[in-house]
Image: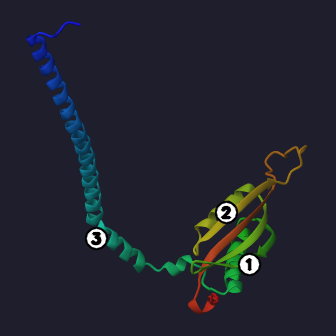
Amino acid sequence: MRPLTALEKRLAAITLSLLVLAAVAAAVVFPYRLAARHYDEAIETRLDEIARYQRIAAAKQSVQKAIAEVNGRDARKFFLKSSASALAAADIQQIVQTLVEANALQLESMQIAAPKNEDGYRRIALNLRLRGKLAGLQNTLYSLEMTQPYLFIDNLSIQSTVRPNFRPTPGVEPDVMSQFDLYGYAQVIKSDVAPRH
């Protein structure tokens, strides 16, 4: 290998200096750019959160007004009148009996389930079996869910009462059998709640 000339030595020194300078610049600039991007994203996230909190704060007055309006309403009309299980069940039975008669249905059975206390309310439930025309059943179910106090239908099962080889008579609608749970809530008076041990 021949010795380098003075010009080649200078070019090699300049190239080596440029490579060292580029490496030092990359070692400084690259982490700086990463940190800058990280902080830019963090600032953008915080500004977004601040804007969201400002929107929430601006809505505070209208939310407080809506809460006051709801608190001003008489919520007791949506609950069963009595917190005593037997009386509350009797209220539900009376509503059911009225609607069953009005819609020409037959009440096959009505059983009262054990009451359950749920977060300061007592759930009073009945299991019902009704028989009649589908239109009457539809009206009854709709009326039960639209009544006050609020009643809720759960576990609804509707079955046809006709045999597989049934030939319908023109103009005569066959009966259907329905079974469902119907429940409402009563407000529990503090003295009604058994103490927990």
- Asked whether residue 140 is in view, the answer is no
Q: Which residue, given by chain and number where applicable, does mark 3 sit on?
A: 61
Please tell me how crowded label 3 is: few (under 14), some (14-19), or many (20+) other residues with Cα within 10 Å: few
In this image, 13 relative to 79: left or right?
Answer: left
- Element class at badge 2: helix
Q: Which residue, given by chain and number where applicable, does mark 1 sit on?
A: 114
Image position, residue 190 (x, y; %): 57, 90
Please tell me how crowded label 1 is: few (under 14), some (14-19), or many (20+) other residues with Cα within 10 Å: few
Image position, residue 156 (x, y; %): 72, 60
Residue at image x 20%, y 38%? 28
* Distance (Cα) linking label 3 and label 1: 43 Å
Q: Which residue, given by chain and number where applicable, does mark 2 sit on?
A: 141
Q: Earlier in the sequence, mark 2 or mark 1?
A: 1
Image position, residue 98 (x, y; %): 70, 74
Residue at image x 15%, y 10%? 4
In this image, 28 relative to 6: left or right?
Answer: right
Q: Nearer the viewer, mark 3 or mark 2?
A: 3
Q: Earlier in the sequence, mark 3 or mark 1?
A: 3
Q: Quadrant of the N terminus?
A: top left
Q: Is residue 75 above or below residue 29?
A: below
Q: How many marks?
A: 3
Q: Earlier in the sequence, mark 3 or mark 2?
A: 3
Q: Looking at the picture, which amino acid does disc 3 mark?
A: Gln
In this image, 61 relative to 84: left or right?
Answer: left
**Labels 2 & 1 near each other (Cβ < 8 A):** no
